[in-house]
Image (cartoon, rainbow, N blue to C red):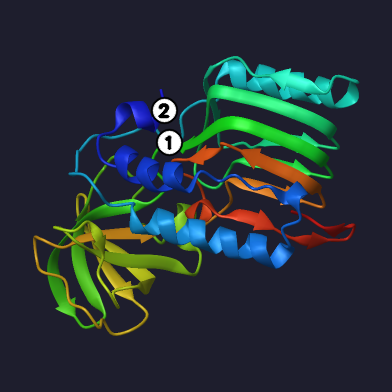
Amino acid sequence: MSCIEEQVFSCNALASCASNAGIALAARNGLSGGALACLSIMLSVLLLAGIFCCDIVFARPSVPPPISSNAVQLQQELDTLISSGKEQFVIPPGVYTFSNSSLILTGARNKTIIATGVTFVFYYGFGLMITGCHYVTVEGLLFDSEPPNYAQGLVTSIVNETSFVARFDERFIPPDTREGPFSGPKTKVTLWDPKTKRILQKSLNFMVASTESAEGEYQITVAHPMKVFPTEGVTPITVIPRRGFTWHALNSSQIVADGVTIHAGGGFANLLFKYGKYGKST
């Protein structure tokens, strides 16, 4: 089951920003690489701005969920589609759990994939990998992540200007720098206004260390002295590792996402646009 179906906390937040963004990338209409990169940044801001909107619910998810049989079958069917002359493929509605693996689309040309009513669920850092594809359109797909792809909780005490203790919701991945996605650099820390559900201005920072002080509680050390201090027991916190991707198009051209929605994914739900050995990818 998708985290959209299971959790109370993150679904509305992520859906509100990602759904409103819509992610309709009409690359075939002549958007430049720079314009698409700007659109990617805008989507990142939208996701970050709306991520904290509900109350915390405590429960422990499986990490990661097992890959579903329909996901395995879908990868096989798409591989067959690429080698065939068929131009349109309809994915049956339903939830496809890919867990800690990506759905890979390689070498497709002149294909339309209709995914209305389809949800892809990935574990943190995995998603749809498109490589060496040209003139491919994906319609109506929804991306989700299980468990939710960030740590979230409430600040319980302030240690000093670069350190504080927070109790984290156990439904989310714990902000443990010893393992998992939080072990790398550039993990973002954000404080929120509990009333407006928006980021506190000048609160953005980077986590450099975390120590589990009690069950569900971590002392977080940030890179820079805090310009805005949280209120103990009141101020919400989100720690986002920014690893992996959700939709990654590499060495491809004329790739269109039509009505695609990202509820949760790696790297703030960025769409990646890269220049590879074989030219521009959009």
* Whole-number angstrom distance, CA of label 2 to CA of label 1: 6 Å
Q: Which residue is mark 2?
A: 2
Q: Residue at x 58, y 52 (%)?
A: 244
* Numbered label attached to residue 146: 1
Picture layout, residue 75 above or below residue 253 = above
Are circles 2 and 1 on residues that touch, CB within 8 Å?
Answer: yes
Question: From where the camera sits, is residue 139 visible?
Answer: yes
Locate residue 19, reporting x and y percent. 44, 41
84 or 79: which is nearer to us? 84
* Amino acid type indicated by mark 1: Glu
Tell me the crowding category of disc 1: few under 14, some 14 to 19, or many 20 or more residues within 10 angstroms, Cα based.
many
Locate residue 221, reporting x and y percent. 30, 73
Secondary element type, mark 1: loop
* Amino acid type indicated by mark 2: Ser
Picture layout, residue 177 above or below residue 13 = below
Q: Is residue 151 left or right of residue 2?
A: left
Picture layout, residue 62 above or below residue 117 = below
Q: Residue at x 57, y 30 (%)?
A: 140
Locate residue 164, reporting x and y percent. 20, 71
Tell me the crowding category of disc 2: few under 14, some 14 to 19, or many 20 or more residues within 10 angstroms, Cα based.
many
239 or 180: which is nearer to us? 239
Disc on the earlier residue, 2 or 1: 2
